[in-house]
Image: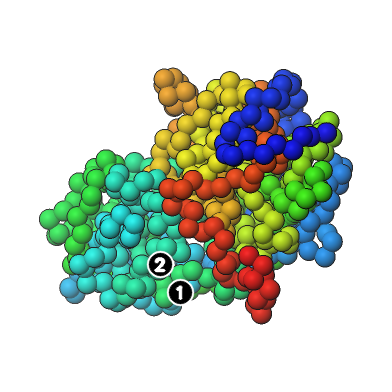
Amino acid sequence: MSTRVSCALTIVCLSLASAARPVEPGRFDGRSWWAHVKVLADDRRQGRETGSPGLREAESDVVDQLKKAGLEPAGEDGGFYQKVELESRQVVEKDSSAALVRGDKVEPLVLGEDAILSARVDLAPEVEAPLVFAGYGLRVPEKGYDDLAGLDLAGKVVVVVNGSPAEIPGPLASHYQTNRERWKAFREAGIVGVVSVPNPASMDIPWPRIAASRAQPAMDLRDAAFHETEGAELAMVYNPARAQTLFAGTGHTFAEIAALARERKPLPRFPLGASVRVKARVEKQPVESANVVARLPGSDPTLKSEDVVLSAHVDHIGVGEPIGGDRIYNGAMDNASGTAVLLDVAFALARGPERPRRSVLFVFVTAEEKGLLGSKYFAARPTVDPASMIADVNVDMFLPIVPLRRLTVWGLDESDLGDAARAAAAAHGVEVQRDPEPQRNIFIRSDQYNFILRGIPALMMAVAPDPASPEQVKLFRDWLTQRYHAPSDDTAQPVDLSAAGLYEDVVRILVLDVANAGRRPEWKPDSFFRRYTGKVPSPVAPGDSSRSRRR
Ligand SMILES: [Zn+2]
């Protein structure tokens, strides 16, 4: 039985809720979590590439567990699945080439060593255009900041360094680095292509692995209503260790620019005195995949029409270039770990003593690794009433590799959910911190972002190293360099089961508190993301105007 509480402030209400509930230690010991991870990240699942039999089997494992937990299907046609239609694009390198052209001098580039072509945009068969260095390539109207201002960019290809100046707050900087926002600004300036140079100070993985990733096809949703980079003819990623060639003869060096970018200082902007010449042949294939959606119905007759969403991606990057003789990119932490958290929390809530008042919607998405495509599709064309979703807690690669004393919460200051997360963590004596590395853009790099764009308050949490412990800081850094998107992110790696179990309980408390609170979470008055509240979803289903009216 629950008492109906009315609170003037959701924050107070949420904190009271967690203060009142005694914590039951040992509810999760990490063992069930690890058992789920072992199934999903098994070699037989072949790294769960989007569209592959391995991902289909892993999703069927998930559905079996959801049935066992007694959840209701909430996908299409009364089932657990939502079909997601995609197109894969693979650059055929033997029929493709790239070069820098300076006057009559042509300097061929070696694909894979100097740069790679990115089929995230629909590459034109042939492009030749002058290069202009545009700093971070960012336009942030809220801050009156514009790297494109004052440059002649019509018909040009811009070279940009990934990152942002310190004066732009993290969430805002991340938002304007999305493909969608970048290409809005680029199109307006007449830019036809982009060469991005990873910021050596914030590269998660070393160049050889970035280069190796080009063996995997890029994907986009098949429906053109979702495409975001129209007008783009070229996208390249340039090896920072070779980037000096781009700046030859300009009076600037890449070392000088990288040093400024490391400090998040403003960057100079200038024409590079060279053109890029690219021929690209791209093979396209239709790909079919699916999201998995299930609901635990709430206990309150009115509030059960509202859903607290828990999301995690099931897909990973499949089979690729062997590293240390291993070709299977198992994705144990990325993101069998998050999928397993959702399954454990589903069991705990379904079998717990008290049903949450609101419903809890479990959304397992596909194609996250291809650019958050499964969640983008679900958030735009949900299988449930779009207005029912009041919050999203996303779990992606939460890294229980040290004891859990501190959580990083992305979106901590943006909505009431941040306060609820703080309270849920405090129930276990765990501290929370905001994103200590905003330049890595984690806030836009996982599925919560697509819910945010629909006006739904969202956050993501992960285990953080103790900043006072050089060993822990190194452990996390090494994990990213060596295991992230590598075959060694498998079940042979060491994990901290008690940290995983504790994390699961923080998620369980957070979801319960939000599901039981008197009021739904809201964006903070000064949050940039508040602007998406109540916005008509775009794109809507073709010919479906009822959905946009419902919002
Ligand atoms: Zn990943």
Name the quadrant of the N terminus.
Answer: top right
Q: Quadrant of residue 43?
A: top right
Instruction: Report if the CB atoms under discs 2 and 1 are less than 8 Å apart.
Output: yes
- The answer to which image quadrant residue 237 occupies is bottom left
Mark 1 closeness class: few <14, some 14–19, many ≥20 residues within 10 Å: some
On screen, residue 101 above or below 401: below
247 with respect to 454 (left or right): left
* Left or right relative to 455: residue 176: left
User: Which residue is drawn at the image coordinates 47% and 40% (left, top)?
Assistant: 413
| Residue 277 appears in view | no
Tell me if I can see residue 240 in this picture: yes
Q: How many marks?
A: 2
N-terminal of the pair, mark 2 or mark 1, is 2
Q: Which part of the image, by quadrant, shows the C terminus?
A: bottom right
Answer left or right for 332 relative to 89.
Answer: right
Q: Position of residue 366 (x, y in %)?
A: 66, 56
- What x and y, as percent, mark residue 240? 32, 50
Taking the spot 34% from the left edge, 73% from the top edge, the residue there is: 188
Locate residue 517: give its quadrant: top right
Tell me which amino acid carries mark 1.
Answer: Glu
Q: Does 499 sit left or right of 210 as displayed? A: right
Instruction: Residue 445 in the image: state x and y as whole percent.
Output: 51, 50
Tell me the number on the disc at residue 230: 1
Residue in view at x 39 percent, y 63 percent: 182
Residue tagged 2: 183
